[in-house]
Amino acid sequence: MIRILYFASLRERLGRDGETLQEFPATLDALRAELAARGGAWGEVFADEQRVLAAVNQEMASTGQALKAGDEIGFFPPVTGG
Amino acid sequence: MDVEIRIQPTALDALAETAPVFTGKASVGGVVSFIGLMRDLNQGDEVSSMTLEHYPGMTEKALAAIVDEAAGRWELEAVRLIHRVGEVRPQDPIVLVAVASAHRGEAFRACEFIIDYLKTRAPFWKREQTADGQTRWVEARGSDDEAASAWEKKS
């Protein structure tokens, strides 16, 4: 099982703030592809990788990162603090 | 080094929060602080309020990592980094970065480094409400990415 969190404009566009997946792919890239394949807003949001950042266990993630049971994955737009 | 990092939903008294970085620390020779304020204008539109959201848990880790990196680059005596979340209005302080060091050069550089990195690495997002009642998410700026990446080449 993995836990996914969606923040800011992503949360609004997807209409949810998170979910858990019992079955999950081996990598972050595969997870992005799986979410994009849901179509509709999911396809639009996850089509543009530059605009969707990801964190695994609250650390900024890079492409090719492996996923394991118990991971927390956060998806969000480029940050705008300060 | 004395470090205090906070994320708070309540008003930020930036001037009162700056004093503790040097009070009672006789080794401090200089303090540099940056106060980020909400403006009433963005992209040509009048903005009446703004709501700041963050990623609880990750934000604290990201800010601590930025301060650690600053402390590794420069000799610092104290750092205080406070960021607002929730609703803010024009003139409200959004962020305070206060850095104390024995000498000014280290304090100036570390303060700018911390705010530049915070802008691109800490998971905060702003949604603004314009005077005509529209709400919109603030877009990230390319100039912020450039400012942060410039630190990879200098010290």
Image (tube, rainbow, N blue to C red):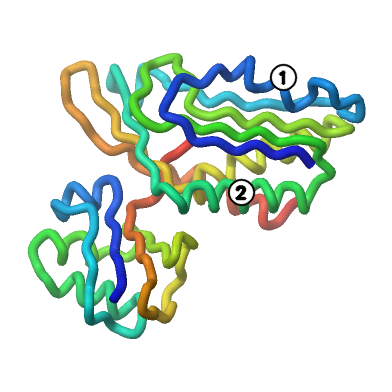
Q: Chain letter for mark 2, please.
A: B
| A6 displayed left or right of B103 | left
Q: Amino acid at mark 1?
A: Ala
- How many other residues sit within 10 Å of disc 2, few (<14), some (14-19) or many (≥20)? some
Taking the view exactly as shown, the residue that stands out farthest to the left is A40
User: Closer to the camera, B7 or A14?
Assistant: B7
Q: Nearer the viewer, residue B6 or A30?
A: B6
> What is the quadrant of residue B75 in the picture?
top right
Total marks in image: 2
| Amino acid residing under circle 2 | Ala
Q: Earlier in the sequence, mark 2 or mark 1?
A: 1
Residue under label 2: B64
Give the residue at x 72% y 23%.
Answer: B20
Residue A60 location in percent, x, y?
47, 62
Respond whether the residues carrying marks 2 and 1 are from the same subunit.
Answer: yes
- From the viewer's perspective, is A61 left or right of A7? right
Residue drawn at x 19%, y 70% as measured from the top left: A36
